[in-house]
Image (cartoon, helix red, strand yellow):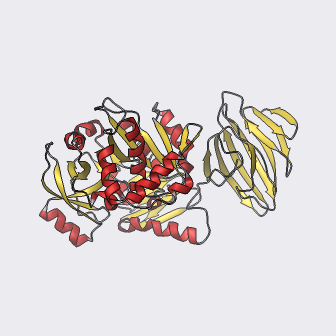
Amino acid sequence: MNDKIHPVILSGGAGSRLWPVSRMLFPKQLLPLASDRSMIQETASRVSGPGFEAPLVICNEEHRFAIAEQLRQISITPSHMVLEPAGRNTAPAATIAALMLHRLAPDALVLLLPSDHVIADSENFLDAIFPGLAPARAGALVTFGIKPATPETGYGYIRTGEPFPHGDDCYHVEKFVEKPDLKTAQGYIENGGYLWNSGMFLFRADSFLEDLGAFKPEILESCHAAITAMREDLDFLRLDRAAFEKVESISIDHAVMEKTSKAACVPLDVGWNDVGSWSALWDLGNRDEDGNVIKGEAVLWDTRNSYIRSEGPLVATVGVENMVVVATDDAVLVVPKDKSQDTRAIVDELKARGRTEHAYHTRVYRPWGYYQNIDVGPGYQVKHILVSPGAKLSLQLHHKRAEHWVVLSGTARVIRDEEILTLGENDSIDIPLGAKHSLENPADTPLRIIEVQSGSYLGEDDIVRFEDIYGRAGHDDGNGGGS
């Protein structure tokens, strides 16, 4: 047996309860919400030391380039990055991971971790999970329960039973409990024996697959088919869409853990938080003498026990108590702190109204850099575009819009139909409607340009790609298409 643990990092969620900062195409796990690093960077760093293999990352295909870049920034190279063509909850993702690691070694030890949790005591994380290692190696499916500090209604609970063989401080799982109401949660705290369900798991690949095959054979079959037809795409592995979309969307708890006789639980006390709402960030934050957590530019008067965050504009509050106020450059959220879990309802309403603020920030990241929306009106749109050193936008054309580019800084190499042009600071160029064009940064410093679009339709899906170094030629990459 290889004694090293194979971390599997799951990054498929949209983090809608942390809107408007977290959005579908750049969700909370990619954001530095609780430290100077993003949550997925913190997760990967936590399991990058001795005793761990390189992480296997399973992620939403729309986030692939951002995740790869963030891991590169902290010098972590995943063993693989597997792209899910559709969200199917944690059981299918765990199955994909177990099948892939089973190929390396049937008894490979899998540590399944959500990418968007905070663990304050990262230094002692390995010591904290140690009681689960021997039971997992013996075939147990180990989960980690968090010692509850308060009667939290936003978490599921685990009822623990008798001590589990093969390990100290590890217990049989008597039952999993869905999120309770406040009275029930208070009873759990008073009676003892209940832990918060962390959503972290440790198991041998073969042991998990054995139980999954017994309880949900159709998931095992479809996931196996998705891997069999999987294809390489640059540094990524794309699961077969047709096979994976047939998989039932279900959690590990419902698919396996509630049914197995091998469920074990290790109590964990490492400062865990799933950051499932803005109130959780108030809990984690450094509060001033009035109990306020302040991020960004804000002026507070007669304000107490509130979370105030600005990603741009100045936020001012008067006579506010127990509130969350979050401002970005295109949206403002105001909600009582005890209702902040309901922010998802706003996201659902935005979708129903056909708006885009649930999905996009004004700054949209691409594998070559990003663009930032500056202004939009009838028949025109203005963007600030940054192209990273050595990066190149696809060779493309638009059927319904023309573009005008002005170089702010850096060097631009432009293809416009049969022409190849080099532009410097203050140079400009027109891209007529229907012209085949591309933009490249050949220098070792960022290229910044202003793009003015004009035409009858300015949507990001008005694009035809011919060549693309990021493997997106001929199809929409799922990010809204553009550039």
Can residue 314 be seen in this snapshot? no
**Looking at the picture, how far across and down is residue 151, in whole percent?**
23, 64
Residue 73: x %, y % from top left = 50, 33
The residue that appears at 36% across and 40% down in the rendered structure is 7
Residue 478, horizontal then vertical, whole percent: 61, 53
Residue at 74%, 45% in the rendered image: 450
Asked whether residue 215 is in view, the answer is yes
Quadrant position of the N terminus in the picture: top left
Q: Residue drawn 46% across and 46% down? A: 58
Of residues 346 and 140, the one drawn nearer to the viewer in this rendering = 140
Residue occupying the far right of the picture? 418
> 75 or 227, which lies in front?
227
Q: Residue at x 72, y 29 (%)?
A: 442
278 left or right, relative to 152: right
Horizontal placement of 328 versus 268: left or right? right
- Horizontal placement of 101 versus 27: left or right? left
| In the image: residue 179, left or right of residue 86 | left
